[in-house]
Amino acid sequence: MVLIARSAPGYSLAQRLLHWGVVLLCLTQIPTSWAIARTHMTHAFMQPAPFDLFLHRVHAWGGWLVLAFAVVRIGLRYFHGVPPLPAASSQITRWGSAVSHALLYGLLFALPITGTGAMYVNSAAFAPIHRLLTWSLLAVAVIHAGGALWHHLVRRDEVLRRMIVGIRTAK
């Protein structure tokens, strides 16, 4: 997945809200996934708890909302643009940023698709893939957050602050 984007002096308010919205939605997916596991552990003679069934639906709708946000974010990335990395960034930093963003977007697309497949098509086929992608998203998100913190705490540049408060970089 190639993420071609125009250069922009900063992230728009919509880009920042969608970014943090995806973060919050992904965090809600964790406890709601536990309810899915509980609903699947019930036996034929037992009914799943109504609250677990509700959380199952919250998980599904949360995943679909993540997918919708990711689609909008790709559009904003293309039409509004994104700020470039600081000029002093090394080639490995630029490569790492590009790869991590491509992986994040790919996973944000693949997870709702495989989750929907597990829910409506074939749980035995899609659920293991969905779980693997979930752990992959966690790993890439930790690396992404670590990179943002590295920029903020070590490099002391504007990379993290422009996603939090919308600081603009000079062109």
Image (cartoon, rainbow, N blue to C red):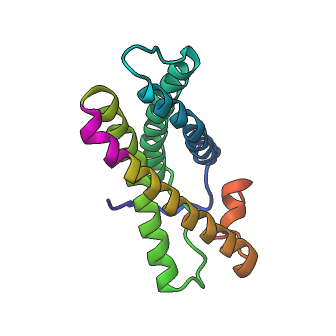
Q: Which residue is at the front of the view, 148 or 46?
A: 46
Question: Residue at (52%, 56%) from the top-left corner?
Answer: 138
Taking the image as shown, residue 127 lies to the left or right of residue 171, namely: left
Taking the image as shown, residue 135 lies to the left or right of residue 52, namely: left
Q: Whole-percent x and y of residue 127?
A: 33, 41
In this rendering, is residue 79 above or below 46?
Answer: below
Q: Whole-percent x and y of residue 9?
A: 61, 62
Main secondary structure along the magenta-highlighted residues = helix
Quadrant the N terminus occupies: bottom left
Number of disc labels = 0
Residue 124 drawn in magenta: yes
In terms of image quadrants, where is residue 168?
A: bottom right
Q: Whole-percent x and y of residue 159?
A: 65, 68
Quadrant the C terminus occupies: bottom right
In terms of image quadrants, where is residue 147?
A: bottom right
Magenta residues, start to end: 122-130
Question: Residue at (41%, 28%) from the top-left corner?
Answer: 40
Camera sees residue 78: no
In terms of image quadrants, where is residue 136?
A: bottom left
Q: Which residue is at the front of the view, 153 or 131?
A: 131
